Image (spheres, rainbow, N blue to C red):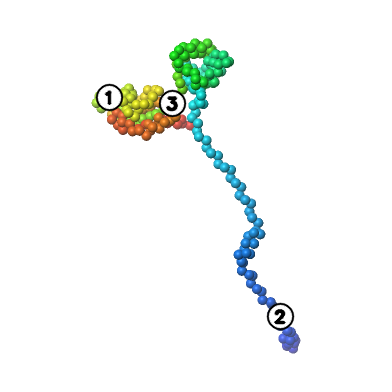
Amino acid sequence: ALSEKVTKLETAASKPPPPPKPATKPPPAPSFLSAARAAADKPQPPPPTPKPAAKRRQPTKVVGLPEEGLRKWVITPSVRMKDSSARPSPLAIVAKLNGKPSSNSVLTAYWTPAGKLHIVANAAVDYAAPGSLDLYDRLLRTIPGFEHGILHIAPWVKITKIKIPDVPVWNHTTGAPYSIQDVTAALDHSTAFSDVHVTNRAAWAKAPATFRPTTLSAVSFSIEDPDGAVSNRLRHTALYLLGKKCRFEKWKPKPTPANT
């Protein structure tokens, strides 16, 4: 057994050593040219999809203003027609006011929720001219449902509701509350209010029966404001009313509570 091991060792020692492995060169450092070629050969991502152009917001058109060359009129019936189903047809009203097919001064007519009749007509026709009320009153009385006639005809104007918050209500000289007539007279003498056309009389926001010497209440009224310039000017004008510095604000109706 020992001789066999010696023989194996001698045989292994007599074999030539294996040839050396060739040395491997490190990869060359990337050059600017090779990097550019690699970038050019790399598949490019698809171009981004262009976003659609944002739509420009159109200026808000004042609702209710008639087109150029037309004029709107308000016809108030002598009897307020609360039931919309009982109101005369606007088409019948237009036909009656125009009188005959060749006369097209009135273009359209419609009822408002308050029961007033609005007509849009050629601006050259003055429906408030002397004698017009009697003429159109007789015409409209011939329409079924319009037997009571009309109260007046007036050019349509945009109405804006304004309020003056925190107005003192107590006259400490007389020991009694101010009346709404006192407030109206004070407004009429104010230089900030001299050129404003009020369409309805002022009203207290709180019930006069609740007035006390320390009570403050808002006063509301409506004005003619065709383009919003009057109310905008008033909101930036100081007002001295009944011995207190006040301010004008645009009226904001109270939100209606949601049904639960």
Q: Nearer the viewer, mark 2 or mark 3?
A: 3
The answer to whether residue 233 shows anywhere in this view is yes
> Residue 102: x percent and y percent?
57, 16
The mark lying in front, picked from 1 and 2, is 2
Q: Please tell me the numbered disc located at residue 159.
A: 3
Q: Secondary structure at mark 2?
A: loop
- The residue drawn where x is 42% and y is 31% is 229
Q: Quadrant of residue 22?
A: bottom right
Q: Quadrant of the N terminus?
A: bottom right
For marks 2 and 3, the one nearer the N-term is: 2
Residue drawn at x 60%, y 64% is 32
Tell me the crowding category of disc 3: few under 14, some 14 to 19, or many 20 or more residues within 10 angstroms, Cα based: some
User: What type is the residue that disc 1 sits on?
Assistant: Ala
Residue at point 47%, 14% (across, down): 132
Residues marked 2 and 3 touching at CB (< 8 Å): no
Q: Residue furthest front?
A: 124
Q: x and y percent of residue 68 in the render?
A: 51, 26
Q: Nearer the viewer, residue 99 or 201?
A: 99
Provide residue 183's location: percent of width, then percent of height: 32, 25
Q: Earlier in the sequence, mark 1 or mark 2?
A: 2
Amino acid on which the number 2 mark rests in the picture: Pro
Residue pictured at 55% horizontal, 41% vertical: 54
Which residue is the site of mark 2? 19
Please name which of the two marks, 3 or 1, marks the residue nearer to the observer.
3
Provide the secondary structure element on which disc 1 rests: strand
Is 106 on the left-hand or right-hand side of 255?
Answer: right
Q: What is the three-letter code of the residue carrying label 3?
A: Ile
* Distance Cα–Cα, label 1 vs label 2: 126 Å
Label 3 vs 1, first from the N-terminus: 3
State the SS at label 3. strand
